[in-house]
Image (cartoon, rainbow, N blue to C red):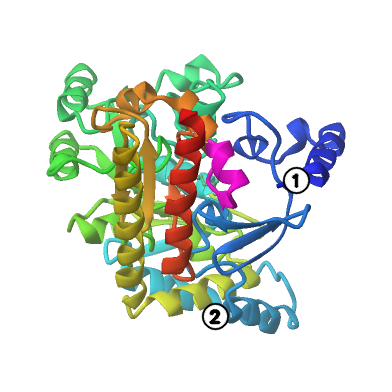
Amino acid sequence: MKHEISEKLFTEAQKHLVGGVNSPVRAFKGVGGHPLFIVRAKGSKVYDADGNEYVDYVGSWGPAILGHAHPKVITAIHYTMKDGTSFGAPTTAEIELAKKVKNAFPSMELVRFVNSGTEATMGAIRVARGFTGRDKIIKFDGCYHGHADSLLVKAGSGAQTLGQPDSAGVPADFAKHTLVADYNNINSVEKIFEAHKDQIACVIVEPIIGNMGCIPPKPDFLKNLIELAHKNGALVIFDEVMTGFRVALGGAQELYNLKPDLTCLGKIIGGGLPVGAYGGRQDIMEKVAPVGPVYQAGTLSGNPLAMAAGLATLVELEDRKAYATLEKLGAALEAGLKKVAAQHNIPLVVNRVGSMLSFFFSDKPVTDAASARNADSAFFKKVFHGLIHQGIYLAPSAFEAGFISITHTPDDIEATIFAFDQVLTQLKK
Ligand code: PLP
């Protein structure tokens, strides 16, 4: 498989764009080599500039749950854009999308749309601070909540891949308000609450981590977290930017029957266009401007094209049938990967919740950031490149989740398992 055109384009791109990309993980630094330039995508497949086809497990990092270029989403965008692309004034599509979000997430009594997941978490943290009158927040090692200052402390995703879990440029005076606990370890949270009595505004958590690879919560971890936070007068923010409409229509909170105070969404709700949202209890959200004193605004927030793409996507998911299909495909992929690894005597952990999945080359369970870091990421890099050459496109990092869409077929899954087997065979030689 040739990648000459992608390679040339990357050389050119680096002359004009920082690192040749507009988001760090895309640069392939986590796995080495150069990124693929994608020219087209349809259903479960992406096509690169050299004309190669791949079964895609990146799915635009989560939004593409219906597969790429879903006809109803494309039609909705076309239909909407002929009347204008942005007005900076209210539209009915915002009401419609908010109703659909609230329907799936009953904990979100009031919603604010923004343009990205980063904006959603930034807004949610600000309102939690405004509501409680407290400054400090708790996050978990390895959770990534976007690139706002107070959240780039011990962050996962690209920050992890590039070895910068604490970003330069974040003033120590900001970072000192972010306290870091260990995921799946309620004692670590308890200790922080004890040490900072009446100072903590909120705990923000990816209810299922996706940004250290996929790491599900242990039974009762999230329930205990909510109880502990509330006992201490703090709010709980579920960052469901990745899990919202992904692991169930109502995200992780539906799956585990939990009610956070605030929720952040992104990715799927924009159907591939830039959208984020935060929302939650009415009394908390009423602190946000123009009703309350917490300021947050956006020129393009609630953009009509983005609302239309999001609406078309959620309509397709609402009958929940997609989730049974996704579970079936995910289970088949998990079983296949485990079987192949066992045949090769290679220790492999597969963490999966529905259509969100990661594999770690490890002989121990991966339950938190430390155990994810302990997995053999050097071997992952080799497997990653082997799979690319077999036409399988994974996220270019050992610390990211993979996503399946409803357009993935049993044949795609079988081809992926076959390719995994081929790659492990080659690497053993
Ligand atoms: N929160 C989570 C859980 C995410 O996975 C991401 C992005 O991957 C974000 C927030 C930030 O979203 P965005 O990249 O749209 O700013």
Callout 2 amino acid:
Thr
Residue 415 position within the rendered picture, expressed as x and y whole percent measured from the top left = 48, 58
> In terms of sequence position, does the residue under pointer 1 or pointer 2 come before the other?
1
Q: Splitting the image into 4 quarters, where does residue 375 fall?
A: top left
Q: Which residues are magenta?
A: 384-397
Which amino acid lies under the numbered mark 1 shown in the image of this protein? Lys
SS label for mark 1? loop
Residue 391 is a magenta residue: yes
Which residue appears at 53% of the width and 46% of the height? 394
Within the image, what quadrant is residue 309 found in?
bottom right
Q: Nearer the viewer, residue 143 or 112?
A: 143
Residue placed most toward the observer, 243 or 168: 243
Identify residue for label 2. 92
Instruction: Identify the residue at horizontal 45%, vertical 52% (top origin).
Output: 418
Q: Quadrant of residue 184?
A: top left
Q: Secondary structure at mark 2?
A: helix
